[in-house]
């Protein structure tokens, strides 16, 4: 049987197995009003779900069994996603660990790295974070100043990362660091695997606009890691980082499920009905626009997933899905605040304030995973073939550039 098609009876049997699992376990993450500013409770619930999924033989569907996957086909993966899309998502907090770190480890890791890390990543026992951004290197992440210097069988890392989502709950992080300052900035970067409990790694919370602290600054002071922790080739980190960012845009733009999902609009429609506002023609029009955008995004995501399924590494087209999520988030905020009315400006306890929190955090959507301006640049340059931005530092050795906020 071809990898991308299941026989109808096999497909239906597998979907039935997924449904049976999801009926029991995908019941939504409820914190029962308990405060969870650092996201620990949510993460524990996510890990419980992922463990159950692993025990049921449904985790890491397309990854080989020898590395802790289920060893199934892409058609099984599609059937799972289609089925999961009808249930509340339980795995949003694994979007970086599974959407970005896992495919990078599987694609570029050595056999030893895959044996050491994949199974525990897939089962959610170890959660992974992404450590790219620095105080002086975000959009222009190739200007990063965190450095890794070789010392015998080890690399010594010094520097600082910032905006590291959920770093405090992670066992490992994928970091990019400067390994050769004598060549142009894109050419002297390498990618490494860092255990977050290594001596010299310090994770500090960043306080966010909605009161939560999911973000972190991560400081590295003489952190020693083995040379075995190099991911991919030495000084090939920029190419690796670009591949990981493509996975990130796809993960953000296509979510963790499949099929056509309009759950954000559906929830707003429910709320409008609850408040007796569903007859308002202006509101109905906006809700319809939102639903249409969500449907289009699902279709774009399906196309992107089909490309991945056909064996292609996600290309710059992933930026289109990422841009659409931003437009949807902005409109969602506008509509939700119109529905919430005066109660949109405040909430009283932790269990309340869902819409308000969504509105406050929605501002980050146009920044996370590369800003809206950067996505437009990528689409302009690499999808539409427009002339590239002027680059003043092309060919200049990194050590001769004036970059960032730290001194070297
Ligand atoms: C919710 C969220 C989660 C995140 N999680 C992580 C994470 O887990 N790991 C991680 O490493 N990072 C993470 N980030 C950081 C994110 O990748 C950076 O914030 C982002 O790349 C922008 O970098 P910056 O904040 O330094 O802004 P800057 O790069 O300083 O940009 C400032 C402004 O200038 C504009 N700009 C910059 N360059 C150009 C250009 N060439 N053309 C046009 N406009 C330009 C930008 O669009 C922006 O409006 C996260 C951010 C958010 C909001």
Image (cartoon, helix red, strand yellow):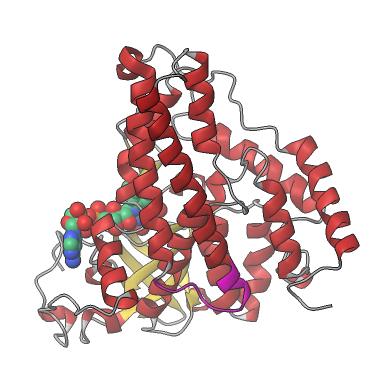
Residue for point 36% across, 83% down? 235
Tally of numbered discs: 0
Residue closest to the eye, 173 or 1: 1
Percent x, y of residue 315: 44, 74
Q: Which residues lie in the magenta part? A: 306-316
- In screen coordinates, is 12 left or right of 255? right
- In screen coordinates, is 307 left or right of 163? right
Residue for point 10% across, 80% down? 400
- In screen coordinates, is 375 left or right of 328? left
Q: Quadrant of the C terminus?
A: bottom left
Image height of 407 relative to 399, above or below? above
Q: Is residue 68 visible?
A: no
Residue furthest out toward the front:
281
Image height of 108 relative to 221, above or below? below
Q: Does 220 lie within the magenta span? A: no
Percent x, y of residue 209: 29, 31
Q: Is residue 8 visible?
A: yes
Image height of 156 relative to 22, above or below? below
Question: Where in the image, quadrant-wise, is ligand 1 located?
Answer: bottom left
Percent x, y of residue 213: 38, 35
- In screen coordinates, is 178 left or right of 290? left
């Amino acid at each position: 049987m071809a990898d991308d098609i299941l026989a109808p009876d096999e497909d239906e049997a597998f979907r039935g197995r997924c449904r049976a699992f999801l009926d029991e376990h995908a019941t939504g993450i409820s914190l029962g009003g308990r405060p969870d500013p650092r996201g620990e409770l949510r993460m524990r619930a996510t890990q419980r779900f992922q463990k159950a999924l692993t025990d049921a033989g449904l985790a890491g569907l397309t990854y080989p069994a020898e590395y802790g996957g289920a060893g199934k086909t892409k058609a099984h993966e599609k059937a799972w996603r289609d089925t999961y899309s009808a249930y509340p998502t339980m795995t949003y907090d694994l979007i970086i660990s599974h959407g970005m770190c896992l495919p990078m480890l599987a694609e570029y890791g050595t056999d030893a790295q895959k044996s050491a890390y994949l199974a525990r990543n897939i089962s959610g026992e170890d959660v992974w974070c992404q450590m790219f951004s620095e105080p002086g290197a975000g959009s222009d992440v190739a200007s990063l100043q965190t450095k890794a210097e070789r010392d015998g069988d080890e690399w010594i890392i010094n520097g600082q990362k910032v905006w590291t989502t959920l770093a405090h709950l992670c066992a490992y992080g994928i970091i990019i660091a400067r390994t050769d300052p004598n060549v142009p900035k894109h050419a002297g970067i390498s990618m490494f695997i860092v255990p977050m409990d290594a001596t010299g790694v310090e994770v500090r919370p960043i306080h966010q606009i909605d009161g939560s602290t999911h973000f972190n600054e991560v400081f590295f002071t003489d952190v020693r890691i083995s040379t075995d922790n190099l991911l991919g080739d030495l000084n090939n980190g920029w190419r690796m980082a670009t591949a990981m960012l493509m996975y990130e845009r796809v993960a953000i733009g296509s979510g963790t499920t499949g099929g056509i999902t309009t759950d954000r609009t559906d929830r707003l429609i429910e709320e409008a009905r609850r408040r007796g506002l569903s007859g308002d023609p202006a509101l109905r029009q906006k809700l319809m626009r939102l639903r249409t955008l969500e449907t289009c995004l699902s279709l774009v995501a399906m196309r992107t997933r089909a490309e991945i399924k056909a064996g292609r590494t996600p290309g710059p087209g992933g930026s289109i899905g990422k841009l659409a999520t931003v437009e949807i988030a902005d409109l969602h905020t506008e509509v939700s605040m119109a529905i919430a009315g005066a109660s949109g400006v405040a909430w009283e306890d932790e269990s309340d304030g869902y819409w308000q929190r969504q509105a406050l955090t929605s501002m980050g959507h146009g920044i996370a995973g590369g800003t809206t301006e950067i996505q437009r640049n990528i689409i302009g340059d690499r999808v539409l073939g427009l002339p590239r931005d002027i680059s003043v530092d092309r060919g200049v050795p990194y050590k001769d550039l004036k970059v960032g906020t730290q001194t070297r």
